[in-house]
């Protein structure tokens, strides 16, 4: 069990949080979400994806989102890309600091997600990492369906480890293991994260969990215990994948922050501002969001709230 004092958080709500939503979200609201995330302390944000707008209509305004990003030297803006063309689009904006490449652990899902085999997706990810470096940018890679596939079911750990080793050859800043459809359990997570961490050191391991079956927070805790240093999360717990049947929301930034901060791990995030952003975003989406902490009363109670209750008791 690793003992750490701080965990890096990557905010993915502007991209993964919104990409599967049917309600059209304006560019202005996406930029407001990004600005609110920054104000709450987020310093790495997945702002959009450069994909075919016919396949993912919610991301059709990727260039406009990038044009409106606040100029911040202390924030890393991440653009998700599936192929060379997407990577070139992202770089052309001049606003993306880091490319997020994606490969997939099974052939059937890789074909549905990006029209290539699992091995082909690894090769494409390595090419994207190379292109980023050639253009003075950084890149990271995510292995989708690391813990289970919507089409093929169980995924062999050995295969995921081999993919990670191959990706590491290209020198990404980190490699992420993604539970795309939320089938992971803490024991599996601990085992796979530990194996991948040992195989790719000193490259860090990032994790990306969906809360489809209610195991998201437990999986985050298990991953950190096994050596993961960075966690993806989405304000409000929104999220899903258009190409993965049954994929539900990401682990919520507010919920992960509450859990880690209460356990003595710094996230650099302001929980109160995250909860306020949850309430704002619920209005934009016109629905209650899945995150739990925003539905509960603050704990520990704010000083003024405590004093008020004490006065009432007297």
Image (cartoon, rainbow, N blue to C red):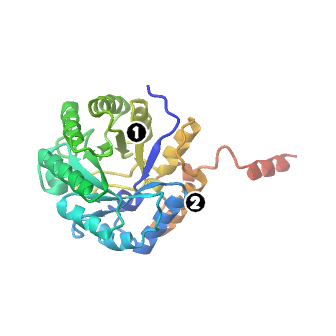
Who's the residue at 46% across and 44% down the image? Answer: 8
Circle 2 SS class: helix
Q: Is residue 81 visible?
A: yes
Q: Is residue 119 above or below residue 155?
A: below
Q: Which residue is mark 2?
A: 276
Circle 1 SS class: loop
Q: Position of residue 172 (x, y in %)?
A: 28, 46
Who's the residue at 14% across and 45% down the image? Answer: 118
Badge 1 or badge 2: first in the primary sequence: 1
Q: Which residue is mark 1?
A: 215
**Nearer mark to the viewer, of 1 and 2:** 2
Who's the residue at 25% across and 67% down the image? Answer: 89
Residue in front for this viewpoint, 256 or 95: 95
Q: Is residue 244 visible?
A: no
Q: CA distance from mark 1 to mark 2?
A: 25 Å
Q: Is residue 246 above or below residue 207?
A: below
Tell me the quadrant of the picture where the N terminus can be found: top left
The image quarter in which residue 98 lies: bottom left
């Amino acid at each position: 069990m690793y003992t750490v004092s701080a965990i890096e958080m990557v905010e993915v709500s502007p991209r993964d949080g919104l990409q599967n939503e049917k309600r059209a979200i304006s560019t202005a609201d996406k930029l407001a979400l990004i600005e609110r995330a920054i104000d709450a302390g987020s310093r790495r944000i997945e702002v959009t994806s450069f994909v075919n707008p016919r396949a993912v209509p919610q991301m059709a305004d990727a260039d406009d989102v990038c044009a409106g990003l606040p100029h911040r030297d202390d924030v890393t803006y991440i653009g998700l890309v599936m192929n060379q063309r997407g990577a070139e689009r992202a770089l052309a904006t001049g606003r993306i600091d880091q490319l997020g490449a994606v490969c997939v652990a099974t052939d059937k899902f890789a074909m549905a997600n990006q029209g290539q085999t699992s091995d082909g997706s690894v090769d494409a990810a390595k090419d994207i990492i190379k292109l980023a470096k050639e253009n003075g940018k950084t890149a990271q890679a995510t292995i989708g369906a690391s813990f289970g596939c919507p089409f093929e079911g169980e995924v062999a750990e050995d295969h995921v480890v081999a993919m990670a080793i191959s990706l590491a050859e290209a020198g990404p800043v980190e490699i992420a293991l993604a539970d795309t459809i939320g089938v992971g359990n803490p024991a599996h997570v601990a085992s796979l994260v530990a194996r991948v961490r040992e195989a790719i050191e000193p490259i860090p391991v990032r994790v990306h969990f969906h809360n489809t079956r209610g195991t998201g927070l437990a999986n985050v805790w298990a991953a950190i215990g096994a050596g993961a240093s960075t966690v993806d999360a989405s304000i409000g717990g929104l999220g899903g994948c258009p190409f993965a049947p049954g994929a539900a929301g990401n682990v919520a930034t507010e919920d992960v922050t509450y859990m880690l901060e209460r356990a003595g791990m710094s996230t650099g995030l302001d929980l109160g501002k995250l909860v306020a952003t949850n309430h704002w975003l619920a209005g934009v989406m016109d629905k209650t969001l899945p995150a739990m902490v925003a539905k509960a009363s603050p704990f520990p109670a704010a000083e003024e709230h405590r004093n008020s209750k004490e006065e009432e008791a007297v």
